[in-house]
Image (cartoon, rainbow, N blue to C red):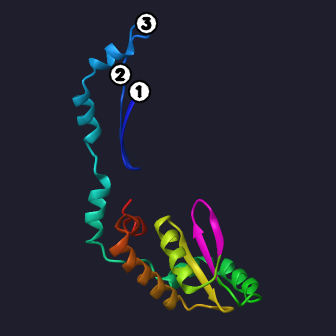
Amino acid sequence: MLEFCDGAMTFARCAESFDPGRSIYEQLEKVDWQKHRKIGMTGGQFFDGVREMSKEIEPVLPPTAEIQKGFRDEIEAFEKTKHKKPSKIYALLWRDDEGVTEEALDSIKSLEGMLCDSMATGYVTLDVIVDGKPLAAKKIDEVKEKVLKEMKEQMPISYARAMGMF
């Protein structure tokens, strides 16, 4: 099996049969490498296309207030336990395959970095507590929008993932 790779998303496997009783070097010389290149390049450059398409997509996510309606019990429990430690920032996240999870952070800058990673990997931010108090849903949305705008400029592939392109 010969494998051609173009990043994490595009690859082509081109099978060749070889006679184990003969020299592999002689057999490799007879392989139609140009045919394999054509197969491998078909559909290639996926990320170049995503990078260009991401320029056209505006940063729009569902409002946090709407998302929170489906997680009232989880948010209530989260807010009760995190009021005891007001010196940190806490975020409550959800992803379909992992359920609810929490992150403890030291600063707003750390929160922005975590949001960048979490949005690009399919997590939804349910709630954020800063200095022992829940951050208003509108404020969470403002932070997410700021992060998305930076992602659009600096990390178009992660931005495209955050926006659900792939």
> Which residue matches tag 3?
21
Q: Amino acid at mark 3?
A: Gly
Q: Position of residue 28 (x, y in %)?
A: 32, 19
Mark 3 Cα-neighbour bin, 10 Å: few <14, some 14–19, many ≥20: few
Reading the chain from its start, which is encountered first: label 3 or label 2?
2
Q: Element under label 2?
A: loop
Q: 29 or 121, which lies in front?
A: 29
Q: Is residue 18 visible?
A: no
Q: How many marks?
A: 3
Q: Amino acid at mark 2?
A: Glu
Compared to residue 42, the image places residue 88 above or below, namely: below
**Rendered residue at 44%/11% (across/down):** 20
Q: Is residue 43 visible?
A: yes
**Rendered residue at 25%/42% (across/down):** 42
Which mark is nearer the camera, 1 or 3? 3
As drawn, the label of residue 16 is: 2
Q: Are marks 1 and 3 in contact (CB under 8 Å)?
A: no
- Please identify the dominant SS of the magenta region: strand
Give the quadrant of the C terminus. bottom left
Q: Element under label 3?
A: loop
Q: Relative to residue 135, is residue 146 drawn left or right? A: left
**Rendered residue at 23%/29% (across/down):** 35
Reading the chain from its start, which is encountered first: label 1 or label 3?
1
Rendering quarter of residue 21: top left
> Which residue matches tag 1?
1
Over which residues does the magenta segment extend? 90-103
**Rendered residue at 58%/76% (across/down):** 70
